[in-house]
Amino acid sequence: MSTSTRSGLGRALIAVYAVFALSATGRSLVQLATKAGEAPLAYSLSAVAALVYIAATLGLAEVGPSPRRLAWAACGFELVGVLVVGTLTVADPDLFPDATVWSAFGQGYGYFPLVLPFVGLGWLVRTRGSHARS
Amino acid sequence: MIDPLQTALIGAALLLAVATGVYVALDRSPDLVLIGLAALVEVGLLVQAVVGIAQVVGDSRGVSVVTFVGYLLAALVVLPAGVLWSLAERSRGATAVLVVAALTVAFLVVRLDQIWSV
């Protein structure tokens, strides 16, 4: 049997994810509502990031039919996202005219967005039981 | 905004974070003292929200009203959610939820000040 992902340390982790889900969603809604045309790529990316954080929060909090799979997918996507977007924004700052959560590896958020997926995936590995597959 | 309240709120939220950190270190669940402190901060946040909304609606001075009010309201949700989540389970990690919540509140108030002084 695998251990619950929302127990112990997992609770604190979910709290951090929830804060990011809230702030990324808020930021994205404001951007899309007030100036969607200015930087469509950056703002769509903000919206995607918001959805990923919501999915990770729900997955880790064990909401939905297969939360562990959801959490794996969300944290994995998050890791790829922050690495790709981080590298692109450092290499070519003009690509995204307005900041997203993942710009410069999450510099604007104290590099939390870079550390978070590693902790999330690490937690999923750690709570994985001896014979749980997903 | 009213600066003394902001300063007090940041200080109180950080104090709450440190105090909760001690509870985490001692492996104790939040008790009435800690919850009382959180409630005190929450009352301050409520005052801030009322005053802040009144001020920004009266004269926005070019401040983004949506963002500003969003931050004011978001700050209200964080502590109650954090307290509920940290009480729902008896573990270090659960108590640490309140540390996260308190730090988030401090951060939100700092950002509110930044948004307001634009």
Image (cartoon, helix red, strand yellow):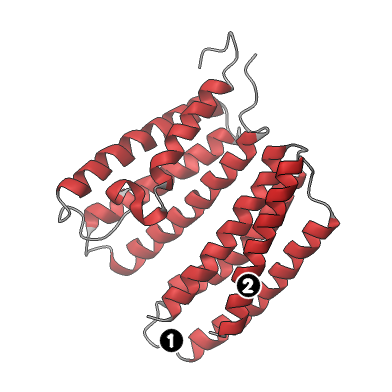
Q: Residue at x 40, y 60 (%)?
A: A27
* Quadrant position of residue A93: bottom left
- Which is nearer the eye, A11 or A30? A11
Q: Does residue B19 appear to the left or right of A128 in the view shown?
A: right
Looking at the rendered image, the quarter that the C terminus of chain B falls into is: bottom left
The residue sitting at 61% across, 42% down in the picture is A12
Using the image, determine if residue A23 lies above or below residue A2: below
Q: Secondary structure under badge 2?
A: helix
Q: Spatial distance from mark 2 to mark 1, Cα to Cα?
A: 22 Å
Tell me where residue A68 appears, x and y as whole percent.
53, 26
Whether residue B54 is situated above or below residue B108 in the rendered picture: below
Q: Position of residue A37 (x, y in %)?
A: 22, 63
Query: Regarding mark 1 in the picture, which secondary structure is present there?
Result: loop
Residue, far bottom? B58
Name the front one of labels 2 and 1. 2
Type of amino acid at the residue the image marks with label 2: Leu
Residue A79 position, x and y percent, is: 36, 35
- Name the residue that disc number 2 marks: B9
In the image, farthest residue toward the top:
A131
Q: Earlier in the sequence, mark 2 or mark 1?
A: 2
To the question of a shared chain for discs 2 and 1, the answer is yes
- Chain ID at mark 2: B
- Tell me which residue sits at (52%, 63%) in the image: B107
Give the vertical position of B41 relative to A72 (above or below): below
The residue indicated by pointer 1 is: B60
- Image mark for residue B29: none
Asked if residue A81 shows in the view, the reply is yes
Label 1 chain ID: B
Q: Residues within 10 Å of mark 1 (few under 14, many from 20)?
A: some
Occupied quadrant, residue A78: top left
Q: Which amino acid type corresponds to the residue marked 1 in the rendered image?
A: Ser
